[in-house]
Image: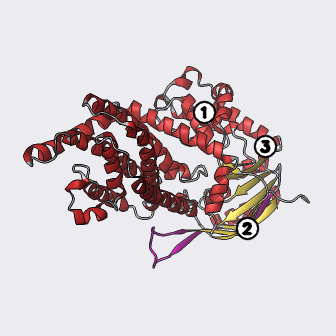
Amino acid sequence: MMARWLFGMAGRRAGHYLDLVVYKAYADLKAEASRTYVNYLWWMIDPLLSLAIYYTVFAIFLQQGGDDFVFVLIVGLVFWRWYGEAIAHGAGTIVGNVGLMGQVDVPKWVFPVVCLITDTTKFACVFVVLMVVLWLGGMGWSAAVLALPLVMMVQLVLIAGAAMLVAACVPFLPDLRHVVTTLLMLQMFLSGVFFRPEAVFEGHREIFFLNPMARLINEYRVILIDGQWPSLHGLLYVAFLGVMLCMFSMWLLSRFDKTYPRLH
Amino acid sequence: MSASPVLELRNVGLAYREGRLRLFDRRRFWVLRDVSFRLFEGETLGVVGRNGAGKSTLLRLLAGIYEQDRGVIVRNGGRASLLSLDAGFAEQLTGRENAILSGILLGLRRREVESRLDEILAFSELGAFFDEPLHTYSSGMRLRLGFSVAFQVRPEILLVDEVLGVGDESFRLKSSAALRQRMDENGTVILVSHSTETVRELCDRAVWISEGATRAEGEVERVLDAYLEDEHARRGRGEVLRESGPF
Protein backbone atom coordinates (compact mmCIF):
# COMPACT_ATOMS: atom_id res chain seq x y z
CA MET A 1 0.00 0.00 0.00
CA MET A 2 2.74 2.38 1.07
CA ALA A 3 4.76 1.52 -2.01
CA ARG A 4 1.75 2.00 -4.24
CA TRP A 5 1.14 5.39 -2.73
CA LEU A 6 4.77 6.50 -3.04
CA PHE A 7 4.89 5.32 -6.62
CA GLY A 8 1.66 7.15 -7.34
CA MET A 9 3.03 10.34 -5.84
CA ALA A 10 6.22 10.13 -7.86
CA GLY A 11 4.33 9.34 -11.03
CA ARG A 12 2.59 11.54 -13.51
CA ARG A 13 -0.29 12.20 -11.14
CA ALA A 14 1.85 14.23 -8.74
CA GLY A 15 1.41 17.41 -10.77
CA HIS A 16 -2.31 16.90 -10.93
CA TYR A 17 -2.56 16.40 -7.17
CA LEU A 18 -0.53 19.57 -6.64
CA ASP A 19 -2.96 21.52 -8.86
CA LEU A 20 -5.88 20.02 -6.96
CA VAL A 21 -4.56 20.73 -3.46
CA VAL A 22 -3.45 24.28 -4.27
CA TYR A 23 -6.61 25.31 -6.11
CA LYS A 24 -8.94 23.67 -3.59
CA ALA A 25 -7.13 25.47 -0.75
CA TYR A 26 -7.41 28.77 -2.63
CA ALA A 27 -11.10 28.13 -3.31
CA ASP A 28 -11.82 27.24 0.33
CA LEU A 29 -10.03 30.33 1.62
CA LYS A 30 -11.87 32.55 -0.83
CA ALA A 31 -15.23 30.95 -0.09
CA GLU A 32 -14.67 31.42 3.65
CA ALA A 33 -13.55 35.02 3.25
CA SER A 34 -16.63 35.93 1.23
CA ARG A 35 -18.92 34.29 3.77
CA THR A 36 -17.61 36.31 6.65
CA TYR A 37 -14.74 38.71 7.11
CA VAL A 38 -15.11 38.40 10.85
CA ASN A 39 -13.82 34.87 10.44
CA TYR A 40 -10.38 36.18 9.59
CA LEU A 41 -10.54 38.86 12.24
CA TRP A 42 -11.43 36.16 14.75
CA TRP A 43 -8.05 34.61 14.23
CA MET A 44 -6.56 37.81 15.65
CA ILE A 45 -9.20 38.48 18.30
CA ASP A 46 -9.35 35.03 19.81
CA PRO A 47 -5.68 34.79 20.86
CA LEU A 48 -5.97 38.33 22.25
CA LEU A 49 -9.00 37.36 24.34
CA SER A 50 -7.28 34.23 25.64
CA LEU A 51 -4.24 36.36 26.36
CA ALA A 52 -6.32 38.81 28.39
CA ILE A 53 -7.97 36.02 30.39
CA TYR A 54 -4.80 34.09 31.18
CA TYR A 55 -2.91 37.28 31.96
CA THR A 56 -5.60 38.37 34.41
CA VAL A 57 -5.71 35.00 36.13
CA PHE A 58 -2.03 34.17 36.27
CA ALA A 59 -0.17 37.47 36.33
CA ILE A 60 -2.63 39.62 38.27
CA PHE A 61 -4.58 37.28 40.57
CA LEU A 62 -1.97 34.59 41.19
CA GLN A 63 1.01 36.93 40.87
CA GLN A 64 2.93 34.46 38.74
CA GLY A 65 5.29 34.78 35.81
CA GLY A 66 8.06 37.30 35.40
CA ASP A 67 8.24 40.62 33.57
CA ASP A 68 8.10 38.90 30.20
CA PHE A 69 5.02 36.86 31.10
CA VAL A 70 2.85 38.54 28.49
CA PHE A 71 5.31 37.41 25.78
CA VAL A 72 5.53 33.93 27.26
CA LEU A 73 1.76 33.73 26.97
CA ILE A 74 1.43 35.18 23.51
CA VAL A 75 4.11 32.90 22.01
CA GLY A 76 2.49 29.86 23.61
CA LEU A 77 -1.02 30.81 22.49
CA VAL A 78 -0.19 31.63 18.87
CA PHE A 79 1.71 28.43 18.16
CA TRP A 80 -0.73 26.31 20.15
CA ARG A 81 -3.64 27.72 18.19
CA TRP A 82 -2.10 26.72 14.87
CA TYR A 83 -1.86 23.13 16.16
CA GLY A 84 -5.25 23.01 17.88
CA GLU A 85 -7.29 24.59 15.08
CA ALA A 86 -5.69 22.57 12.30
CA ILE A 87 -6.39 19.29 14.10
CA ALA A 88 -9.92 20.20 15.19
CA HIS A 89 -10.80 21.24 11.62
CA GLY A 90 -8.91 18.34 10.07
CA ALA A 91 -11.05 15.86 12.04
CA GLY A 92 -14.11 16.64 9.91
CA THR A 93 -12.47 16.71 6.49
CA ILE A 94 -13.15 13.15 5.33
CA VAL A 95 -16.74 12.97 6.65
CA GLY A 96 -17.36 16.48 5.28
CA ASN A 97 -16.50 15.45 1.73
CA VAL A 98 -18.46 12.22 1.38
CA GLY A 99 -20.60 13.82 -1.34
CA LEU A 100 -17.62 14.75 -3.46
CA MET A 101 -15.98 11.37 -2.87
CA GLY A 102 -19.07 9.74 -4.37
CA GLN A 103 -18.61 11.68 -7.62
CA VAL A 104 -14.89 11.50 -8.28
CA ASP A 105 -12.10 9.13 -7.31
CA VAL A 106 -9.75 11.37 -5.31
CA PRO A 107 -7.04 10.13 -2.93
CA LYS A 108 -8.40 10.91 0.52
CA TRP A 109 -5.28 12.55 1.96
CA VAL A 110 -6.15 15.52 -0.24
CA PHE A 111 -8.93 16.65 2.13
CA PRO A 112 -6.98 16.97 5.40
CA VAL A 113 -3.99 18.41 3.52
CA VAL A 114 -6.15 21.13 1.94
CA CYS A 115 -7.48 21.96 5.41
CA LEU A 116 -3.93 22.09 6.75
CA ILE A 117 -2.97 24.57 4.04
CA THR A 118 -5.91 26.89 4.71
CA ASP A 119 -5.35 26.85 8.48
CA THR A 120 -1.62 27.41 8.02
CA THR A 121 -2.32 30.39 5.76
CA LYS A 122 -4.47 31.95 8.47
CA PHE A 123 -1.80 31.16 11.03
CA ALA A 124 0.75 32.93 8.82
CA CYS A 125 -1.19 36.20 9.21
CA VAL A 126 -1.24 35.86 12.99
CA PHE A 127 2.43 34.90 12.96
CA VAL A 128 3.38 38.13 11.22
CA VAL A 129 1.46 40.09 13.85
CA LEU A 130 3.22 38.10 16.59
CA MET A 131 6.63 39.00 15.22
CA VAL A 132 5.71 42.68 15.07
CA VAL A 133 4.40 42.59 18.64
CA LEU A 134 7.59 40.91 19.89
CA TRP A 135 9.69 43.46 18.05
CA LEU A 136 7.70 46.36 19.47
CA GLY A 137 7.97 44.72 22.89
CA GLY A 138 11.74 45.03 22.66
CA MET A 139 12.60 41.35 22.33
CA GLY A 140 16.11 41.63 20.95
CA TRP A 141 16.38 38.88 18.36
CA SER A 142 19.57 36.93 18.16
CA ALA A 143 20.93 34.81 15.32
CA ALA A 144 18.87 31.97 16.83
CA VAL A 145 15.84 33.33 14.97
CA LEU A 146 17.35 31.61 11.93
CA ALA A 147 16.32 28.31 13.54
CA LEU A 148 12.69 29.40 13.70
CA PRO A 149 11.70 28.10 10.22
CA LEU A 150 13.12 24.71 11.15
CA VAL A 151 11.04 24.50 14.33
CA MET A 152 7.96 25.55 12.37
CA MET A 153 8.63 22.90 9.73
CA VAL A 154 8.79 20.29 12.47
CA GLN A 155 5.50 21.56 13.88
CA LEU A 156 3.93 21.44 10.40
CA VAL A 157 4.91 17.80 10.02
CA LEU A 158 3.52 17.01 13.47
CA ILE A 159 0.23 18.78 12.69
CA ALA A 160 -0.05 17.03 9.31
CA GLY A 161 0.39 13.62 10.93
CA ALA A 162 -2.05 14.27 13.76
CA ALA A 163 -4.68 15.94 11.54
CA MET A 164 -4.59 13.13 8.98
CA LEU A 165 -4.84 10.55 11.75
CA VAL A 166 -8.02 12.02 13.24
CA ALA A 167 -9.44 12.65 9.76
CA ALA A 168 -8.85 8.97 8.93
CA CYS A 169 -10.47 7.68 12.14
CA VAL A 170 -13.51 9.96 12.53
CA PRO A 171 -15.53 8.38 9.66
CA PHE A 172 -15.47 5.06 11.56
CA LEU A 173 -16.08 6.58 14.99
CA PRO A 174 -18.04 9.84 14.54
CA ASP A 175 -18.08 10.54 18.29
CA LEU A 176 -14.31 10.81 18.15
CA ARG A 177 -14.74 14.42 17.04
CA HIS A 178 -16.00 15.38 20.48
CA VAL A 179 -13.24 13.36 22.13
CA VAL A 180 -10.66 15.16 19.99
CA THR A 181 -11.90 18.55 21.24
CA THR A 182 -11.59 17.42 24.85
CA LEU A 183 -8.20 15.82 24.29
CA LEU A 184 -6.92 18.98 22.65
CA MET A 185 -8.05 21.00 25.66
CA LEU A 186 -6.24 18.56 27.94
CA GLN A 187 -3.13 18.69 25.80
CA MET A 188 -3.20 22.48 25.85
CA PHE A 189 -3.02 22.46 29.64
CA LEU A 190 -0.17 19.95 29.46
CA SER A 191 1.79 21.90 26.86
CA GLY A 192 2.78 24.80 29.06
CA VAL A 193 0.87 27.39 27.08
CA PHE A 194 0.68 29.59 30.18
CA PHE A 195 3.74 28.54 32.11
CA ARG A 196 7.34 27.70 31.36
CA PRO A 197 8.71 24.22 31.96
CA GLU A 198 10.82 25.57 34.83
CA ALA A 199 7.54 25.78 36.77
CA VAL A 200 7.08 22.01 36.43
CA PHE A 201 8.40 19.93 39.33
CA GLU A 202 11.85 18.82 38.24
CA GLY A 203 11.20 15.13 38.66
CA HIS A 204 8.26 15.37 36.28
CA ARG A 205 9.93 17.47 33.64
CA GLU A 206 11.01 14.53 31.50
CA ILE A 207 7.46 13.27 31.38
CA PHE A 208 6.25 16.79 30.62
CA PHE A 209 8.54 16.90 27.60
CA LEU A 210 7.18 13.65 26.16
CA ASN A 211 4.35 15.84 24.90
CA PRO A 212 5.65 17.10 21.52
CA MET A 213 3.78 20.41 21.79
CA ALA A 214 5.35 21.11 25.21
CA ARG A 215 8.73 20.71 23.54
CA LEU A 216 7.90 22.91 20.56
CA ILE A 217 6.37 25.73 22.60
CA ASN A 218 9.44 25.70 24.84
CA GLU A 219 11.74 25.87 21.80
CA TYR A 220 9.81 28.85 20.41
CA ARG A 221 10.24 30.69 23.70
CA VAL A 222 13.91 29.75 23.90
CA ILE A 223 14.42 31.29 20.46
CA LEU A 224 12.11 34.31 20.61
CA ILE A 225 12.33 35.37 24.25
CA ASP A 226 15.66 34.01 25.53
CA GLY A 227 17.49 34.44 22.23
CA GLN A 228 19.04 30.97 22.54
CA TRP A 229 19.40 28.16 20.00
CA PRO A 230 16.82 25.36 20.27
CA SER A 231 17.74 21.87 21.34
CA LEU A 232 18.35 19.73 18.28
CA HIS A 233 17.71 16.56 20.22
CA GLY A 234 14.26 17.81 21.23
CA LEU A 235 13.39 18.77 17.67
CA LEU A 236 14.53 15.40 16.36
CA TYR A 237 12.20 13.68 18.81
CA VAL A 238 9.19 15.72 17.63
CA ALA A 239 10.16 15.35 13.95
CA PHE A 240 10.45 11.59 14.35
CA LEU A 241 7.04 11.45 16.01
CA GLY A 242 5.53 13.62 13.25
CA VAL A 243 6.98 11.52 10.43
CA MET A 244 5.76 8.30 12.05
CA LEU A 245 2.26 9.78 12.44
CA CYS A 246 2.27 10.94 8.82
CA MET A 247 3.29 7.53 7.53
CA PHE A 248 0.76 5.69 9.65
CA SER A 249 -2.14 7.98 8.71
CA MET A 250 -1.20 7.90 5.04
CA TRP A 251 -1.29 4.13 5.23
CA LEU A 252 -4.72 4.26 6.91
CA LEU A 253 -6.11 6.71 4.34
CA SER A 254 -4.84 4.63 1.46
CA ARG A 255 -5.97 1.34 3.04
CA PHE A 256 -9.56 2.63 3.39
CA ASP A 257 -9.56 4.77 0.23
CA LYS A 258 -12.50 2.86 -1.28
CA THR A 259 -14.26 2.40 2.06
CA TYR A 260 -14.76 6.07 2.99
CA PRO A 261 -17.17 6.87 0.11
CA ARG A 262 -19.36 3.97 1.31
CA LEU A 263 -19.68 5.16 4.91
CA HIS A 264 -22.73 7.31 5.36
CA MET B 1 -15.64 -8.75 -31.26
CA SER B 2 -12.28 -10.42 -31.52
CA ALA B 3 -10.47 -7.49 -29.84
CA SER B 4 -9.76 -7.79 -26.13
CA PRO B 5 -12.11 -5.79 -23.91
CA VAL B 6 -10.96 -2.54 -22.28
CA LEU B 7 -12.99 -3.47 -19.23
CA GLU B 8 -14.25 -6.79 -18.03
CA LEU B 9 -16.32 -7.67 -14.97
CA ARG B 10 -16.42 -11.25 -13.77
CA ASN B 11 -18.98 -12.20 -11.12
CA VAL B 12 -18.63 -8.90 -9.32
CA GLY B 13 -20.46 -8.31 -6.05
CA LEU B 14 -20.62 -5.36 -3.70
CA ALA B 15 -22.23 -5.26 -0.27
CA TYR B 16 -23.07 -2.53 2.17
CA ARG B 17 -22.48 -3.22 5.80
CA GLU B 18 -25.10 -2.03 8.18
CA GLY B 19 -23.67 0.32 10.75
CA ARG B 20 -20.12 1.52 10.98
CA LEU B 21 -17.86 -0.46 13.24
CA ARG B 22 -20.04 -3.31 14.35
CA LEU B 23 -17.51 -6.03 14.57
CA PHE B 24 -19.94 -8.65 15.82
CA ASP B 25 -22.87 -7.86 13.61
CA ARG B 26 -21.70 -8.01 10.04
CA ARG B 27 -25.01 -8.12 8.32
CA ARG B 28 -24.47 -7.39 4.67
CA PHE B 29 -26.79 -6.10 2.04
CA TRP B 30 -25.64 -7.16 -1.41
CA VAL B 31 -26.46 -4.34 -3.85
CA LEU B 32 -24.56 -6.09 -6.62
CA ARG B 33 -24.52 -9.87 -6.40
CA ASP B 34 -23.21 -11.27 -9.64
CA VAL B 35 -22.43 -8.82 -12.41
CA SER B 36 -20.43 -9.85 -15.45
CA PHE B 37 -19.99 -8.08 -18.76
CA ARG B 38 -17.34 -6.82 -21.15
CA LEU B 39 -16.76 -3.40 -22.65
CA PHE B 40 -14.90 -2.97 -25.95
CA GLU B 41 -13.05 0.07 -27.20
CA GLY B 42 -15.12 2.60 -29.10
CA GLU B 43 -18.49 1.11 -28.25
CA THR B 44 -21.43 2.53 -26.35
CA LEU B 45 -22.70 -0.04 -23.91
CA GLY B 46 -26.16 0.44 -22.49
CA VAL B 47 -26.95 -0.82 -19.00
CA VAL B 48 -30.66 -1.27 -18.38
CA GLY B 49 -32.48 -2.24 -15.25
CA ARG B 50 -35.23 -0.95 -13.04
CA ASN B 51 -34.60 1.51 -10.23
CA GLY B 52 -32.81 -0.15 -7.37
CA ALA B 53 -31.14 -2.73 -9.57
CA GLY B 54 -27.73 -1.39 -8.47
CA LYS B 55 -26.97 0.77 -11.50
CA SER B 56 -25.64 3.80 -9.59
CA THR B 57 -23.49 1.56 -7.41
CA LEU B 58 -22.20 -0.14 -10.55
CA LEU B 59 -21.16 3.20 -12.05
CA ARG B 60 -19.28 4.19 -8.88
CA LEU B 61 -17.57 0.82 -8.92
CA LEU B 62 -16.51 1.31 -12.54
CA ALA B 63 -15.30 4.85 -11.76
CA GLY B 64 -12.97 3.45 -9.09
CA ILE B 65 -14.85 5.17 -6.26
CA TYR B 66 -15.92 1.87 -4.71
CA GLU B 67 -14.13 -1.44 -4.68
CA GLN B 68 -15.91 -4.74 -5.20
CA ASP B 69 -16.24 -7.20 -2.32
CA ARG B 70 -15.99 -10.20 -4.58
CA GLY B 71 -15.32 -11.00 -8.20
CA VAL B 72 -12.78 -9.52 -10.58
CA ILE B 73 -12.60 -6.32 -12.59
CA VAL B 74 -10.00 -6.36 -15.36
CA ARG B 75 -9.02 -2.93 -16.66
CA ASN B 76 -7.04 -2.88 -19.89
CA GLY B 77 -7.69 0.74 -20.70
CA GLY B 78 -7.38 3.97 -18.86
CA ARG B 79 -9.51 5.69 -16.31
CA ALA B 80 -13.25 5.54 -16.29
CA SER B 81 -14.98 8.69 -15.03
CA LEU B 82 -18.51 9.65 -14.22
CA LEU B 83 -20.05 12.54 -16.09
CA SER B 84 -20.53 14.60 -12.91
CA LEU B 85 -22.35 17.87 -13.33
CA ASP B 86 -21.45 19.61 -10.08
CA ALA B 87 -18.30 18.00 -8.70
CA GLY B 88 -16.85 20.30 -6.05
CA PHE B 89 -19.10 23.25 -6.81
CA ALA B 90 -18.97 25.96 -4.12
CA GLU B 91 -21.63 28.66 -3.75
CA GLN B 92 -19.29 31.56 -3.02
CA LEU B 93 -17.03 31.00 -6.01
CA THR B 94 -17.67 32.43 -9.46
CA GLY B 95 -18.64 30.27 -12.42
CA ARG B 96 -15.11 30.61 -13.75
CA GLU B 97 -13.54 29.48 -10.47
CA ASN B 98 -16.00 26.62 -10.11
CA ALA B 99 -15.19 25.56 -13.66
CA ILE B 100 -11.48 25.39 -12.86
CA LEU B 101 -12.00 23.55 -9.56
CA SER B 102 -14.46 21.09 -11.04
CA GLY B 103 -12.25 20.50 -14.08
CA ILE B 104 -9.26 19.70 -11.86
CA LEU B 105 -11.39 17.39 -9.72
CA LEU B 106 -12.56 15.58 -12.84
CA GLY B 107 -8.97 14.90 -13.84
CA LEU B 108 -7.67 17.84 -15.89
CA ARG B 109 -4.55 19.84 -15.11
CA ARG B 110 -5.19 23.43 -14.09
CA ARG B 111 -3.61 24.85 -17.25
CA GLU B 112 -5.74 22.50 -19.36
CA VAL B 113 -8.95 23.80 -17.82
CA GLU B 114 -7.76 27.39 -18.08
CA SER B 115 -6.98 26.98 -21.75
CA ARG B 116 -10.49 25.65 -22.32
CA LEU B 117 -12.33 28.31 -20.34
CA ASP B 118 -13.38 30.11 -23.52
CA GLU B 119 -14.96 26.93 -24.87
CA ILE B 120 -16.65 26.28 -21.52
CA LEU B 121 -18.02 29.83 -21.42
CA ALA B 122 -19.23 29.61 -25.02
CA PHE B 123 -20.89 26.23 -24.58
CA SER B 124 -22.55 27.17 -21.29
CA GLU B 125 -23.99 30.41 -22.75
CA LEU B 126 -23.57 32.03 -19.33
CA GLY B 127 -22.18 35.32 -20.66
CA ALA B 128 -21.42 37.84 -17.92
CA PHE B 129 -22.77 35.46 -15.28
CA PHE B 130 -19.60 33.41 -15.73
CA ASP B 131 -17.84 35.80 -13.35
CA GLU B 132 -20.68 36.00 -10.84
CA PRO B 133 -20.83 33.78 -7.74
CA LEU B 134 -22.66 30.49 -8.10
CA HIS B 135 -25.35 31.39 -5.56
CA THR B 136 -26.76 33.88 -8.08
CA TYR B 137 -27.36 31.08 -10.61
CA SER B 138 -30.65 29.40 -11.42
CA SER B 139 -30.67 25.61 -11.37
CA GLY B 140 -30.67 25.61 -15.16
CA MET B 141 -27.56 27.77 -15.24
CA ARG B 142 -25.79 25.45 -12.81
CA LEU B 143 -26.52 22.48 -15.03
CA ARG B 144 -25.25 24.39 -18.06
CA LEU B 145 -22.00 25.23 -16.29
CA GLY B 146 -21.65 21.68 -14.94
CA PHE B 147 -22.23 20.03 -18.27
CA SER B 148 -19.90 22.41 -20.12
CA VAL B 149 -17.06 21.60 -17.73
CA ALA B 150 -17.70 17.86 -17.56
CA PHE B 151 -17.85 17.68 -21.33
CA GLN B 152 -14.32 19.11 -21.61
CA VAL B 153 -12.97 16.11 -19.69
CA ARG B 154 -12.33 13.24 -22.02
CA PRO B 155 -11.81 10.11 -19.94
CA GLU B 156 -10.94 6.92 -21.79
CA ILE B 157 -14.21 5.48 -20.57
CA LEU B 158 -17.09 7.88 -20.02
CA LEU B 159 -19.79 6.80 -17.58
CA VAL B 160 -23.15 8.46 -18.09
CA ASP B 161 -26.02 8.11 -15.66
CA GLU B 162 -29.56 8.31 -16.94
CA VAL B 163 -29.99 11.87 -18.16
CA LEU B 164 -28.46 12.70 -21.48
CA GLY B 165 -29.55 16.24 -21.92
CA VAL B 166 -29.79 18.73 -19.07
CA GLY B 167 -31.18 22.19 -18.48
CA ASP B 168 -33.94 23.97 -20.36
CA GLU B 169 -35.28 22.71 -23.68
CA SER B 170 -32.73 24.33 -25.99
CA PHE B 171 -29.73 23.42 -23.84
CA ARG B 172 -31.10 19.89 -23.41
CA LEU B 173 -31.04 19.40 -27.17
CA LYS B 174 -27.58 20.92 -27.44
CA SER B 175 -26.06 18.86 -24.62
CA SER B 176 -27.56 15.60 -25.77
CA ALA B 177 -26.42 16.33 -29.33
CA ALA B 178 -22.88 16.91 -28.02
CA LEU B 179 -22.95 13.60 -26.15
CA ARG B 180 -24.35 11.74 -29.14
CA GLN B 181 -21.56 13.17 -31.24
CA ARG B 182 -18.98 11.89 -28.77
CA MET B 183 -20.55 8.45 -28.84
CA ASP B 184 -20.48 8.46 -32.64
CA GLU B 185 -16.85 9.61 -32.63
CA ASN B 186 -15.86 6.21 -31.27
CA GLY B 187 -15.76 7.32 -27.64
CA THR B 188 -16.02 4.40 -25.22
CA VAL B 189 -19.15 5.01 -23.18
CA ILE B 190 -21.24 3.18 -20.63
CA LEU B 191 -24.73 4.59 -20.54
CA VAL B 192 -26.97 3.64 -17.67
CA SER B 193 -30.66 4.15 -18.20
CA HIS B 194 -34.06 2.75 -17.53
CA SER B 195 -35.28 4.23 -20.77
CA THR B 196 -35.26 1.52 -23.39
CA GLU B 197 -35.75 4.18 -26.07
CA THR B 198 -32.44 5.89 -25.25
CA VAL B 199 -30.56 2.62 -25.16
CA ARG B 200 -32.08 1.40 -28.44
CA GLU B 201 -31.16 4.65 -30.15
CA LEU B 202 -27.63 5.13 -28.87
CA CYS B 203 -26.06 1.88 -27.83
CA ASP B 204 -24.08 -0.71 -29.76
CA ARG B 205 -24.60 -3.41 -27.17
CA ALA B 206 -26.57 -3.73 -23.96
CA VAL B 207 -26.51 -5.39 -20.55
CA TRP B 208 -29.56 -6.04 -18.42
CA ILE B 209 -29.08 -6.01 -14.67
CA SER B 210 -31.79 -7.13 -12.32
CA GLU B 211 -31.52 -7.35 -8.55
CA GLY B 212 -27.77 -6.95 -8.70
CA ALA B 213 -27.08 -9.66 -11.25
CA THR B 214 -26.50 -9.75 -15.00
CA ARG B 215 -29.52 -11.28 -16.71
CA ALA B 216 -28.51 -10.73 -20.34
CA GLU B 217 -25.65 -9.25 -22.34
CA GLY B 218 -25.25 -8.72 -26.07
CA GLU B 219 -27.21 -7.39 -29.00
CA VAL B 220 -29.39 -4.43 -28.01
CA GLU B 221 -32.70 -5.75 -29.38
CA ARG B 222 -32.31 -9.17 -27.80
CA VAL B 223 -31.41 -7.74 -24.38
CA LEU B 224 -34.19 -5.15 -24.45
CA ASP B 225 -36.75 -7.77 -25.48
CA ALA B 226 -35.80 -9.93 -22.53
CA TYR B 227 -35.91 -6.90 -20.20
CA LEU B 228 -39.31 -5.73 -21.44
CA GLU B 229 -40.75 -9.23 -21.32
CA ASP B 230 -39.73 -9.49 -17.69
CA GLU B 231 -41.19 -6.06 -16.93
CA HIS B 232 -44.55 -7.11 -18.42
CA ALA B 233 -44.49 -10.32 -16.45
CA ARG B 234 -43.84 -8.39 -13.26
CA ARG B 235 -46.66 -5.99 -13.99
CA GLY B 236 -48.89 -8.94 -14.71
CA ARG B 237 -48.04 -10.28 -11.26
CA GLY B 238 -48.97 -6.90 -9.84
CA GLU B 239 -45.51 -5.81 -8.79
CA VAL B 240 -45.28 -2.07 -8.57
CA LEU B 241 -42.25 -0.30 -9.96
CA ARG B 242 -40.13 0.94 -7.14
CA GLU B 243 -39.64 4.64 -7.50
CA SER B 244 -36.28 4.91 -5.87
CA GLY B 245 -33.38 2.63 -5.17
CA PRO B 246 -31.22 2.53 -2.05
CA PHE B 247 -29.88 5.99 -2.96
- Calculate the distance from the C-alpha at mark 2 to the C-alpha at mark 1: 36 Å
Q: Secondary structure at mark 3?
A: helix
Mark toward the viewer: 3 or 2: 3
Q: Position of residue A77 (x, y in %)?
A: 28, 44
Instruction: Establish if A244 lies above or below B159.
Output: below
Q: Position of residue B148 (x, y in %)?
A: 65, 34
Q: Amino acid at mark 3?
A: Met
Residue at the image position 12 percent from the left and 46 percent from the top: A57
Q: Report the magenta residues as a range.
A: B16-39
Q: Secondary structure at mark 2?
A: strand
- Calculate the distance from the C-alpha at mark 3 to the C-alpha at mark 1: 20 Å
Q: Please identify the quadrant where the N terminus of chain B is shown.
A: bottom right
| CB atoms of marks 2 and 1 within 8 Å | no
Q: Residues within 10 Å of mark 1 (few under 14, many from 20)?
A: many
Circle 1 sits on which residue? B144
Residue at the image position 28 percent from the left and 40 percent from the top: A225
Q: Amino acid at mark 2?
A: Arg
Q: Which mark is residue B183?
A: 3
Q: Secondary structure at mark 1?
A: helix
Precedes in sequence: disc 3 or disc 2 = 3
Instruction: Establish if B86 lies above or below A9.
Output: above
Residue at the image position 30 percent from the left and 33 percent from the top: A140
Membership of B105 in magenta stretch:
no
Membership of B26 in magenta stretch:
yes
Front residue (pair A217, B106): A217
Circle 2 sits on which residue? B215
Q: Residues within 10 Å of mark 3 (few under 14, many from 20)?
A: many
- Calculate the distance from the C-alpha at mark 3 to the C-alpha at mark 2: 25 Å
Q: Quadrant of residue B88?
A: top right
Q: Quadrant of residue A191?
A: bottom left
